[in-house]
Image (cartoon, coloured by chain):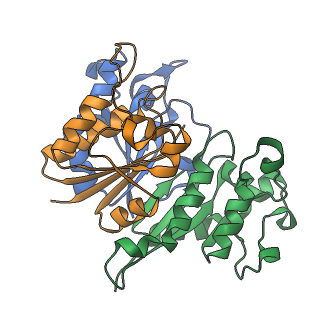
Chain colours: A blue, B green, C orange
Amino acid sequence: MRLAVFVSDLRSTVDTLERLKAEKLGIVLVGNGVYHASLKENGKSSPLLDKPASFYVLSEDLETRGISASEVDSRVKVVNYGDVVDLIFNEYEKLAWL
Amino acid sequence: MADTKLAFVVQRPPYKSENPKLAITHAIAYQTVEILLEEGETVTPTLCFIGDGVLACIKDQKAMDTYGITSTETHLKNALLVDLDVFVCKEDLERFGITEDKIVNADDMGADKRIQVVPYETIQAEMEAAKHVLFF
Amino acid sequence: MGVLSIGVFSSLIGSMNLDFALKLADAALQKGHKVNLWLSGNATSLVKKDQKHLKDYSTGEKPLKALLEKGVEVCTCEACTLARGIQKTDAIEGVQWNAMHWYLAKIHESDRVLHIGGE
């Protein structure tokens, strides 16, 4: 399946994402999930970014938190709400909010 | 005739969050959705409990006695009574040391269905077979 | 163009999930898609009219009314709403009140569904 997962937290109390399998996996970082795109905890990028997936981060939620696009990991594409709509309709068939 | 298959995946434990309860009550609503659909059209949800969500399936919950609210167990029994397929992840039950005899059933209410303890792979297959997946 | 149904459980205040849902709905509309919005659990707080816009808090009334005017179908879970002390007379005009099967019916006709559970 082509699955887009919306990650909205920095810390999650559930490990669902680790187990989900998809032929095409997109991870859309929104809300406090955007920290995964830029934070380097103890000098290391978020392990989330090591997953075999395409990564997107919502620009509005980055800016809200004082993070600029230049601080975003090169593996993550910065998108706006309109881009998210296009991802939803054009790239993925199922959506999950974790 | 068109059927929309849905996978409801519950990943949170009950009571702190309203999610597990709402997952079950939303799934049960499949029984009456036909009044809003064209003739012959149906919606079929499957309830799947994974991760900490499996804790919602432990029987002998006494939420009515302690807080005066319907227990998640009662909601699950109702789900079984209306013939919903309910799956609980075997690996997660084992991780918590929960044996099958501790799982909710609705035998006392005459339900034909029982909660099915299945490997995670089965739940993954349910998600793949569904048109939409909803996480609770 | 497609149909997107968004279901939300999160509260208007204390979570930004509803803010996200409203903005996403608007973006989808601007792209020409049809949008349905289902409010259940704590998200039903969104339908209360006469929200005072204090800048420390999210406000949903204005964007919700704008979405309604643009044709978004918005429905609140009647039981969840009444349980929180919000009566129909207290609610923003144009919001539908129904049971959970409304959401399932909208999902049935949708190309995409984003269900925002969470706290």
Q: How far across and how far down the image is residue B121, in percent?
A: 60, 67
Q: Which residue is pictured at 34% across the width and 25% down the height?
A: C59
Closer to the camera, C103 or A90?
C103
Instruction: Identify whether C105 is placed above or below C7.
Output: below
Q: Residue visible at 26% across and 43% down?
A: C25
Pick out the residue farthest to the front.
C89
Q: Residue at x 19, y 36 (%)?
A: C66
Q: Quadrant of the C terminus of chain C?
A: top right
Left or right, C95 with respect to B119, comes to left
Number of on-image labels? 0
Percent across and percent down for residue C61 are 30, 31
* The one of C6 and B29 positioned closer to us in this rendering: B29
Q: Quadrant of residue C18?
A: top left
Q: Quadrant of the N terminus of chain C?
A: bottom left
Residue B81, visible in the rendered structure: yes
Looking at the image, residue A62 sits to the left or right of residue B33; the answer is: left
Q: Is residue C102 left or right of residue B135?
A: left
Horizontal and vertical percent position of residue A8: 45, 35
In the visual, does B120 lie left or right of C117? right
Name the foreground residue: A74 vs A91.
A91
Residue A29 appears in the figure: no
User: What residue is at 39 percent from the left and 24 percent from the top?
Assistant: A38
Q: At which x and y percent is residue C110?
A: 30, 63
